[in-house]
Amino acid sequence: MFCLKILVSFGSVYLYEMPMKLMCTQENLKRAIGMVERAAGRQSALPVLANVLLETEAGRLKLSATNLEIGIVARVGAKVEEEGSLTVPVKVLSQFVGNLPGTEVATLEEVAQSLSVSCGGYRVKIKGLPATDFPIIPAKKNTNSIELPAQAFRTALSRLLPCVAIQETRLELTGIHFLFSEKELALAATDSFRLAEEIVPLEKLLDSDKVSEIGAIGSLILPSATLMEVSRAISPTQKTLSMTLDENQVFFDMEGVEVISRLILGKFPDYRQIMPQEFSFSAILEKETFFRSIKIASVFAAGEIAVELAPDEERVFVEAVSSGVGEQRAEVPAKFLSGSGRFRAVFPPKSLLDGVGFMETESIAFRGNTSGTPVALAMTDGDTPRTSFTYIMMPIQR
């Protein structure tokens, strides 16, 4: 996102530097540093990427960090005596401020290309680099934002991020797919072996022009690293956040914190084509009992756990065998809504543990067709599976 061309093309921009001086609380400063420091580049040929940019802005302290892929900006209230800007190593500043008393006021002052920080009886001087060396983080040009429900969005990310592909052989699978309609946002993630989709209702209905504008950008895929930082920045009390698209970049605004990132260019798989719509077997299980049986089975699992549905016995059997440890078999009571005969499939332990662990209801639906086809897990209201969150697993093929 922030490539060397940007640095060169903006190299002629001159930021007038003054000996900055301000005061803010240690608690606010610590929180802001904690928000931005994860975006700093730790292993880079550009030393300034390991720094945080400190600058005054409209009576506040603005902190910025970037690794050229993602940028994070945080703002805190401050008493500004002198305007100015400077960059210093974020790790050093974070470790020092993090160990200061939380009730104290910190004074930050630029002294001969260094940052002097005093708080209580503690005082340090940290060597810095000019603000002109710091990459320019793109500013938001488009003011047409989308309001998202903060807590629902954060919950959805917690369930989808574990399903994102780690390997970068298919870059489009290393992010989460966003699909907007007028009333809702469909989020999806897959690593080719499992798929999760969650539907998040929008705070405000989108008009057709805005939906068309989003669609004109193409496949909307956001990097998982970006969304991890967005999730971290959402406070437990935050009600909404705004998302703004600007060419091939996205901006998230969350109560004093802004996350800026590029989009992943590519085409996300048409995953709804592989989502089963009908099932030969459908069982309702008590979530905690099923989850416990899988956790116990994982102790004995040699990379796989077998799940067998037995409608005639109103049971689901969970089995695992390890030549070096032993074997395990558990019976879980189940209510079958459909199915006859037996259904047996084998899954990686993590796929089962994650999928059942994501469920928030007391009972869940386990649905499938044949041992070699996808299996779906869903939360339930009574005997009715919810459609807001769906988790699909591919069995291990033998």
Image (tube, grey):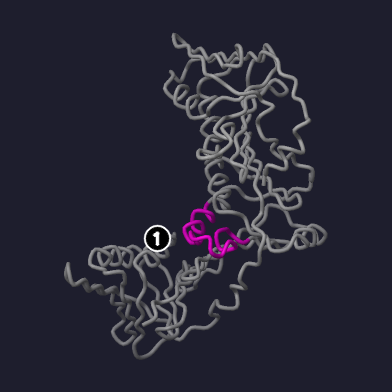
- In the rendered image, residue 336, in percent from the top left (x then y), is placed at 39, 81
Residue sitting at 79 percent across and 43 percent down? 141
Outermost residue on the top side: it is: 121
Outermost residue on the right side: it is: 209
- In the rendered image, residue 144, in percent from the top left (x then y), is placed at 78, 48
Residue sitting at 40 percent across and 64 percent down? 356
Q: How many marks?
A: 1
Say left or right for 367 vs 110: left
Label 1: few (<14), some or many (≥20) within 10 Å? some
Residue 330 in magenta stretch: no
Q: Nearer the viewer, residue 161 or 308?
A: 161
Residue sitting at 38 percent across and 77 percent down? 396
Say left or right for 293 vs 262: left
- In the rendered image, residue 367, in percent from the top left (x then y), is placed at 44, 78
Outermost residue on the bottom side: it is: 341
Residue sitting at 57 percent across and 53 percent down? 152
Residue 160 in magenta stretch: yes
Q: Is residue 95 above or below residue 170?
A: above
* Quarter of the image with the C terminus in it: bottom left
Say left or right for 266 vs 316: right
Q: In this picture, which residue range is highlighted in magenta?
A: 155-177
Q: Is residue 152 above or below residue 338?
A: above
User: Looking at the picture, which amino acid does disc 1 mark?
Assistant: Gly
Q: Kindly state the secondary structure of the residue where label 1 is placed.
A: helix
- Residue denoted by label 1: 357
Say left or right for 309 vs 384: left
Q: Nearer the viewer, residue 376 or 302?
A: 302
- In the rendered image, residue 174, in percent from the top left (x then y), is placed at 55, 59
